[in-house]
Every structure is written in structure tokens, then in C-alpha cells.
Image: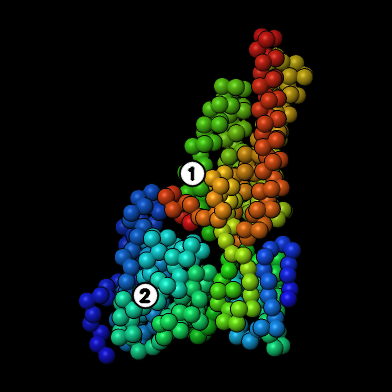
């Protein structure tokens, strides 16, 4: 089990069946192809989008996914909401 | 297998002038209702039973990027109902997700339209779609296409996405198109602050505040990879600092008769008050990027927002003090 300090990504290599789905979906090259399983090549690049965990058929990956948006988090903190949500629908091309 | 079905709409790869005007409006944050595309199944060119199926969101820019990238290719486009939000953001919310994909495949009768049992989903949709679950529930295999629609011809030619197509590129153009929307959201507040500064201190402070806002709204997105810091707040502090140095230098040259201590206080108030504005705007730009993690942003908020607030407050107090001293003197 590899755990990194900069984010919440957790990967249990023992469960991996080397299907490579995580390498396919990750837009930041966090995973790379090893001998028998995928390994964490660049865990610090993870933006916690959660695509790998959702697409891992073996449940080998865990990550607290969410929006990496400061405005959403500060609004959540100010309004006492637990989960920050993307709130720019009304105005932005962002989210 | 029949091709005709009342539920399939015909579309073309060519974008009209009107399409481009709608894109411009969307980039400026205007005419929100025009950004939606009717969800459902679309036929591009002379698509038939053996044609590939591409999935996208019912956001106009997403749909148009897809159909124009598929110019000369016969294909079906399955538009999911994401409430008019783009693929990446809708996937993050889950509206571009497994449930909607499975139910849209069923409601459009896709299995009767095409012989293949594959749908090509944009890679950035993977945040909302679970490929193995979608396959179990719909019988369709989810194949992830490249991040960018423009790479689709290459993807189809090679039969796979190259590693380059799978990596996020947040290029200058990608960043700069976000500026108008960010600016329409941020400039009114900046203008109000600037007006306040004009009455408290004068045109120099007003110009400094506007400059700091522009540094955050335009400078940070434009220069993002070149600002030598990992944290967005620090990137903002750097550019805001440059604006502050310029404003402080100008204030030292501006002989307003307040003497050396007054001038020094005024220059110091700029150095304290202006950088936090750029930094705060830069911190908020994290929401528009496909690069920042919630953990990283949370850490940034705790680390820098108190510093920003402290500096801004100190700057305002110092500026008010020098103004009061100057008024008494004059």
C-alpha cells in the first residue's frame, strides 16, 4: 500500500490485475506499467479527480475525489456546507 | 438493420458563423440558454450500422468541438444530458456519468442502430463514468478516446490514443480563453475596490488596485507555467508584487507634500495592500484548471488566505493613516 503525503491517493498493488485502465484514464501520468502490475510513477501529480478509482475493476485504488476549486471550498466553509460543489453554472465556462 | 429512426437527428461537421458567434458568447459568459444541445443520438455524415459512436455532453462547445473534429468521418454522436455543462465539469459532478450513459444508450435504442457494442467516451469523462459498470449494465464497452477532440482523427487512424493524447495540456490558448469569463466575474468587485481606493488615496491607488486585479485575472493565466512557484497564491503574489513595486515607486516620485514619513507609509501601504488581491484571484483560478487537487487547494487556503487578509488589512490601515496625516497637514 502506497500512501502519499500531498494527496489522498491510495493504491493497493496486490489487488491490481494489470488491466491498465488507470493509466488510460489518468490525465497526469500518475500510473505506469510495471512487470506484473501497474505502479505509482508520479503520485504527486494526482489532482484527485477519482477517474482511476471509478474505473478500476478490482477496487485497488482509493482517492477522496472532489473539485480542486478554491472558490467552491471557501464558499462551502462560509456557508457551513460539508461538501464543496462546483457552483459556477450560472456564470462560468469553468464548471 | 434499419437506419431510420425518428429519434436520430442529422448533424454536420461544418460550423457556421452563427455557431462561432454562440461560442464567442459562451466564452464571454453570455446567452447561457444557447449553450445547450438537445440530448440524444445524432448522425454525422452518412453514418451507418458499422459506424463508431462518440459520446459527449450537451454543452454546445463540447458538441461542436466533437463534430468539427470528426469532419469527413461517418459517425454517431450520443449526447448525454449534462445540464449544458462541459464533459470535464459534468463528470466531476456525476451528471456525465454511468447512470446517464446507460439510460441514454437505452432510450435512444442505440443497440438497434449500430452493430458494434462500443461507445467512445472522452477520457476526461472517466471521472464520472465507470467503464466496467457501464458495460455490465448496457452491454456496451466503454473505450476512452483522447482528451482533446482534435486528436480524434489520429486516434481513429492509430486505433488507440498515444500517451501524449492522454496527458492534460493546459496550453496558453486553453488558459487564455478562460480570461473573459473570469474577468466578468472578478472585474466588478475589483472596480468597486478601485473606486474606494480612489476616494481614500487617489488615482494612483485606484490604478494600482486595477493593475493588481488585471495581474491576477490575466497575468496569472497567461504566465502560469513561467511563474516559478507551485502554489497558485504564490504565483499571484509574484505578479501582484511587481504591480505593487511599480505603484510604490510612482508614489515615492509623486510629491504630495506629505514629507518622507508620509511617502514611505503610502508606498508601504501599496506593497502590503496590492499583492494579496492578485494572490486571491490566482488562488481562485484553481477552479478553472484541470491540474489542482482538493487536498492541495485546501492546504493553500489554510496557508495563504490568513496572510492575504493580514496584509490587505495592514495596507488599508497604513494607507488610511497616511491619508489622515496628510489631510491634517494640508
User: Left or right: where does residue A49 sit relative to residue A6?
Assistant: left
Residue drawn at 47 percent across, 43 percent down:
B184
Q: CA distance from mark 2 to mark 1?
A: 36 Å
N-term-proximal mark, 2 vs 1: 2
Q: Position of residue B301 (x, y in %)?
A: 66, 48
Question: In the rendered image, which residue does mark 2 sit on?
Answer: B103
Residue drawn at 67 percent across, 68 percent down:
A9
B175 or B136, nearer to the observer: B136
Q: Quadrant of residue B110?
A: bottom left
Name the image quarter holding the N terminus of chain B. Answer: bottom left
For mark 2, name the chain.
Answer: B
Q: Residues within 10 Å of mark 2 (few under 14, many from 20)?
A: some
Question: In the rendered image, which residue does mark 1 sit on?
Answer: B185
Q: Position of residue B251 (x, y in %)?
A: 69, 25
* Residue B191 vertical position relative to residue B96 in the rendered view, above or below: above
For mark 1, name the chain.
Answer: B
- Mark drawn on residue B166: none
Name the image quarter holding the C terminus of chain B. Answer: top right
Q: Position of residue B75 (x, y in %)?
A: 36, 80
Circle 1 sits in a helix, a strand or a loop, which is it? helix
B248 or A16, nearer to the observer: A16
Residue drawn at 42 percent across, 72 percent down:
B99
Q: Position of residue B257 (x, y in %)?
A: 70, 14
* Residue B154 in view of the camera: no
Q: Quadrant of residue B116?
A: bottom left
B99 or B262, nearer to the observer: B99
Amino acid at each position: 500500500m502506497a500512501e502519499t503525503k500531498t494527496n489522498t491517493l491510495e493504491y493497493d498493488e496486490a489487488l491490481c490485475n494489470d488491466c491498465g485502465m488507470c493509466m488510460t484514464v489518468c490525465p497526469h501520468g500518475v500510473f505506469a506499467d510495471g512487470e506484473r502490475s501497474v505502479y505509482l510513477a508520479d503520485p504527486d501529480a494526482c489532482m484527485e479527480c477519482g477517474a482511476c478509482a471509478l474505473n478500476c475493476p478490482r477496487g485497488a485504488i482509493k482517492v477522496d475525489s472532489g473539485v480542486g476549486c478554491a472558490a467552491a471550498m471557501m464558499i462551502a466553509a462560509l456557508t457551513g456546507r460539508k461538501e464543496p460543489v462546483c457552483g459556477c453554472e450560472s456564470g462560468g465556462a469553468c464548471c | 438493420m434499419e437506419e431510420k429512426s425518428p429519434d436520430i437527428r442529422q448533424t454536420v461537421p461544418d460550423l457556421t458563423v452563427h455557431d462561432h458567434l454562440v461560442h464567442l458568447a459562451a466564452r464571454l459568459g453570455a446567452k447561457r440558454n444557447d449553450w445547450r444541445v438537445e440530448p440524444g443520438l445524432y448522425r454525422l455524415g452518412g453514418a451507418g450500422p458499422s459506424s463508431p459512436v462518440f459520446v459527449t455532453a450537451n454543452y454546445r462547445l463540447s458538441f461542436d468541438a466533437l463534430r468539427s473534429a470528426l469532419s469527413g468521418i461517418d459517425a454517431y454522436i450520443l449526447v448525454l444530458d449534462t445540464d449544458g455543462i462541459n464533459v470535464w465539469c459534468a463528470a466531476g459532478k456525476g451528471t456525465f456519468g454511468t447512470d446517464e450513459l446507460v439510460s441514454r444508450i437505452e432510450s435512444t435504442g442505440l443497440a438497434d442502430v449500430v452493430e458494434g457494442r462500443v461507445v467512445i467516451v472522452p477520457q476526461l469523462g472517466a471521472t464520472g463514468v465507470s467503464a466496467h459498470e457501464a458495460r455490465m449494465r448496457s452491454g456496451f464497452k466503454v473505450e476512452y478516446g483522447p482528451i482533446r477532440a482534435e486528436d480524434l482523427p489520429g486516434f481513429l487512424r492509430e486505433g488507440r490514443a498515444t500517451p501524449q493524447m492522454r496527458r492534460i495540456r493546459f496550453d496558453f490558448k486553453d488558459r487564455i480563453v478562460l480570461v473573459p469569463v473570469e474577468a466578468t466575474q472578478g472585474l466588478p468587485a475589483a472596480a468597486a475596490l478601485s473606486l474606494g481606493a480612489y476616494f481614500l488615496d487617489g488615482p494612483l491607488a485606484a490604478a494600482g488596485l486595477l493593475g493588481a486585479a488585471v495581474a491576477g485575472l490575466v497575468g496569472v493565466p497567461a504566465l502560469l507555467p513561467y511563474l516559478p512557484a507551485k502554489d497558485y497564491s504564490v504565483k499571484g503574489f509574484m505578479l501582484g508584487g511587481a504591480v505593487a513595486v511599480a505603484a510604490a515607486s510612482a508614489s515615492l516620485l509623486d510629491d504630495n507634500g506629505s514629507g518622507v514619513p508620509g511617502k514611505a507609509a503610502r508606498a508601504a501601504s501599496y506593497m502590503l495592500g496590492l499583492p494579496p488581491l492578485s494572490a486571491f484571484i490566482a488562488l481562485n483560478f484553481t477552479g478553472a484548471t484541470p491540474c489542482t487537487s482538493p487536498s492541495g487547494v485546501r492546504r493553500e487556503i489554510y496557508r495563504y488566505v490568513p496572510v492575504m487578509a493580514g496584509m490587505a488589512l495592514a495596507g488599508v490601515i497604513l494607507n488610511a493613516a497616511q491619508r489622515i496625516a496628510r489631510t491634517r497637514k494640508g
